[in-house]
Image (cartoon, helix red, strand yellow):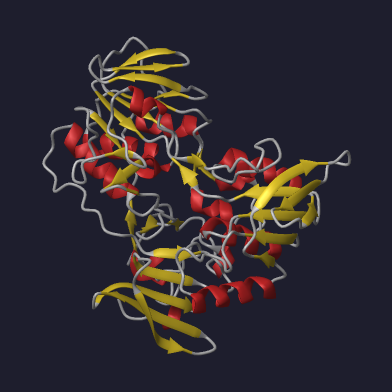
Amino acid sequence: MNVSATNWRSFICRACGLIYDEEKGDPDSGLAAGTRFEDIPDDWECPLCGVMKSDFEPYVGFDPDGTTCASVPASRADGVVIVGGGIAGWAVAEAVRALDSDVGITLVSACHADRYHKPELSIALGRGLAPEALVREGAADAARRLGVRLLTDTFAVGLSPSLRQLRTSRGTLSFTKLVLAQGARPALPAALSPDLCWRVNDLAGWSGLHGKLKRGARRVAIVGAGMVGCELAEDFARAGHSVTLLDLQSAPLAALLPAQAGERLRSSLETLGVDFIGDTQVAAVTCGDDGCKTVTTANGLQIVVDEVVAATGLVTASRIARSAGLAFERGIVVDPVSMQTSASGVYALGDCVSISGMPCRFIEPIAKQAAAIAHHLLGRPHAGYAHVQPVIRLKTKSLPIVVHGLPCPDGEWVVIEDSADMLCMQQRRNGELVARLEVGSPRHRLAA
């Protein structure tokens, strides 16, 4: 293929959303800057989630000719208002603008709204990435490119769907259509004081922790051995820190993995130097005069560390949704096809929604949800969103783990392959295959 040296292309991973930029390459996996996508070996893996080259597709962002202004006049009283400056919020802005170059778009964000790929937060330290290296596009640049009116450091405080008004900390905005993309916040148990615990749920939180850890080897306690806790534990250990990982369950990721897989994960983490303590509940975290924190467990164990990280799950804030009369069940209830909430003209997507009573906190579906919303609110024909359980990939480099389907508590796990390099299992419920699991090198995965 004859491609101009200045015509650099980008390709997006359908699984996790990582974008491969030909101009930048991927030096960490041996692809020099300027490596064309067609020149990448077929067995190259996504550096973030481990899927193969065939799982990437061309990515073209909207770049209208002549769009240079970053804002729309504040007097505009119609158009699309998006609440949330994360992946979901910007995905909707991209999708709407790709269909309509004129409609007004206002994006309201409680943070700076710089564009970054959230899954990279749990693997950034071991790769030596500073906070600024994670930013793919500054918020102001994205706003200029998309012709979006951007309100950063602005909080949504109230919503009236009938009046088509959103109350914010900067005043009231009128809208024709509204999209809620405010994500979810860390679920912090009472024993973990927010003043003493880091929460790595956004770039700001990770940046503060990075500032502490870059000073040299530190002792870190991570409370919660779910996906984020396990990924952070490996990442911090690879960066040279002493890590203690605590969880209520006897093995890491016990809510998702059967015992055989959980033990392999535990062994892999301990090989890296992570001290896993299971069957443990944190009773308190206190800070001494020297700045060190003491984590005290319910059975009296005391662990002295420099930093404490809470990885205890997420919860969707319900105040605005409930006060606006939106249906809420473990998240904002949305129509599974249009992603419209129980209020006409109000949509939601990403971490803040629930579909059939279940939260949908995965990166992979966001682009499809955004496309469905954009078409529906603009009245364009579209098949709509079709929810499929995303493939779950644990970004532990020493032991890749992939789960297809959704394991259920009363299913029966059956071992298909059990070798030193690979564990493959299937779960059946009432004779029906509901989940598949691969623990080991992605090159040996079961056929889809």
Q: Position of residue 222 (x, y in %)?
A: 66, 54
Does 142 sit above or below residue 240?
A: above
Query: Which part of the image, by quadrant, shows the N terminus?
Result: bottom left
Q: Position of residue 390 (x, y in %)?
A: 34, 60
Q: Judge by depth and name the residue closer to the eye, 162 or 66.
A: 162
Residue furthest to the left: 381
In which image quadrant can residue 327 be found? Answer: top left
Q: Answer yes or no: is residue 21 visible.
A: yes
Residue furthest to the top: 75
Query: Which part of the image, by quadrant, shows the C terminus?
Result: bottom left
Residue furthest to the right: 290
Does 142 sit above or below residue 200?
A: above
In this picture, residue 337 sits left or right of residue 29: left
In this picture, residue 417 sits left or right of residue 225: left
Q: Position of residue 197 (x, y in %)?
A: 67, 43
Identify the residue at horizontal 17%, vertical 36% (top origin). 376
Q: Judge by depth and name the residue closer to the eye, 336 or 6.
A: 336
Q: Answer yes or no: is residue 218 visible.
A: no
Q: Judge by depth and name the residue closer to the eye, 143 or 325.
A: 325
In this picture, residue 222 sits left or right of residue 41: right
In which image quadrant can residue 182 be found? Answer: top left
In which image quadrant can residue 56 be found? Answer: bottom left
Q: Position of residue 143 (x, y in %)?
A: 42, 30
